Image (cartoon, coloured by chain):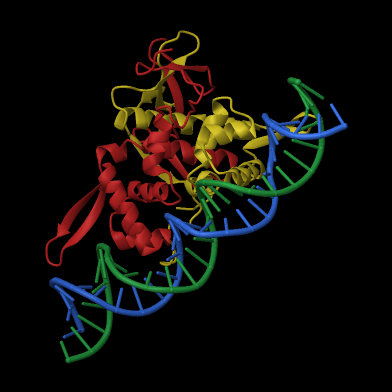
Chain colours: A yellow, B red, C blue, D green
Amino acid sequence: MADTENNADRACSIQASLDILGDRWTILIMRDAFRGVRRFDDFRRDLDIARPVLTERLKRLVVAGVLERRLYCERPPRYEYRLTPMGAALSPTLVALMRWGDEWINHDEPPTVLVHEACGEPLDQAFVCWHCDETFTQSAIASRPGNAVTH
Amino acid sequence: MADTENNADRACSIQASLDILGDRWTILIMRDAFRGVRRFDDFRRDLDIARPVLTERLKRLVVAGVLERRLYCERPPRYEYRLTPMGAALSPTLVALMRWGDEWINHDEPPTVLVHEACGEPLDQAFVCWHCDETFTQSAIASRPGNAVTH
DNA sequence: CCGACTTGGTTTTGATTCCGAACTCGCTTA
DNA sequence: TAAGCGAGTTCGGAATCAAAACCAAGTCGG
């Protein structure tokens, strides 16, 4: 391996994700989308974001395939922004962020609790090894290069 | 509740987390910290980030309690930045981001795979209901206000 | 039929923030 | 003595941001 290599060059899915999500507003826009916000002005009011910035961010998210721009009224033409499956797949990321904030910043007063729909009890996020059929929140985790890299 | 209320005002742990992590560089800095990067110039080279920006970000992360600035050499004085427990607790967030990038951007060639240290098999991230003793990756999830908010 | 209002933007105009390059400081090594 | 290194600080100029005004297409109230 060349010694000029650095992690920024190396393919990294965190980097790739942040190329789409990595600015001050985008993750908050996605959070709102999860909460059911769909319309331009609702995003704008809710986030208190400047219009041109919101316009640009929504466009980028649509291009990235995370939101879909859909006509919901023909005359006058009105558009709404909805989560695509790719966007909906962000839920573990947002949940992880929320739980981290709950635990380390808002400590004893989590503003929102996620519950198992079937039983109504609070739920947790964890790592699972389907092979060992084991669940753990601690980090008994190692990493190795994927199939794109030979080791 | 006042109708001027919006989600930005409302206490939100995602918002709180992003107040610490929410700019173009911070999450990448944390990723590097997880990979074992500790020194100023290593971060700088690895991320190709401007020095003043890195200085400011590291300071903020130390103030936030996510990194610890530790003297590792007395003469000349040299400091390194290490994850605190609060910082280490970000691993589920970073894993979620990585897996999302794996699945939706890098599709068939995940650059890095996480494995269960005990058995070496790939591991997954999921939601768990300890009450029902059930694990699921799909979203059978509802949310309700936490104890800080009356509904 | 006229004017006010709504949604979903675009344009324009300063104020921040960012980046690159050069400089500093304390110390080590040749 | 000079050169080099780690860890920053100090400058401009460039990109980005926010606030406010403007626009367009339609709707509603009187």
User: Which residue lies at the image location 46% right of the left edge and 8% below the top edge?
Assistant: A119
Residue placed most toward the observer, A6 or A151: A6
Left or right: residue B15 versus residue B100 is left
Q: In this view of the protein, can residue A90 be seen by the observer?
A: no
Residue placed most toward the observer, B28 or C6: C6
Quarter in which the N terminus of chain A is drawn: bottom left
Quadrant in which residue C13 is drawn: bottom right
Residue placed most toward the observer, B147 or A119: B147
User: Which residue lies at the image location 41% right of the left edge and 36% below the top edge?
Assistant: B93
Q: Is D14 placed above or below B8 here?
A: below
Q: In this view of the protein, can residue B22 be seen by the observer?
A: yes
Quadrant in which residue A74 is drawn: top right
Q: Which residue ends up furthest to the top in the rendered image?
A: A119
The location of residue D9, given as percent across then percent down, is 27, 66
Left or right: residue A65 versus residue C17 is right
Left or right: residue C7 versus residue B16 is right
User: Which residue lies at the image location 43% right of the left edge and 67% below the top edge?
Assistant: A4
The location of residue B4, given as percent across then percent down, is 50, 26
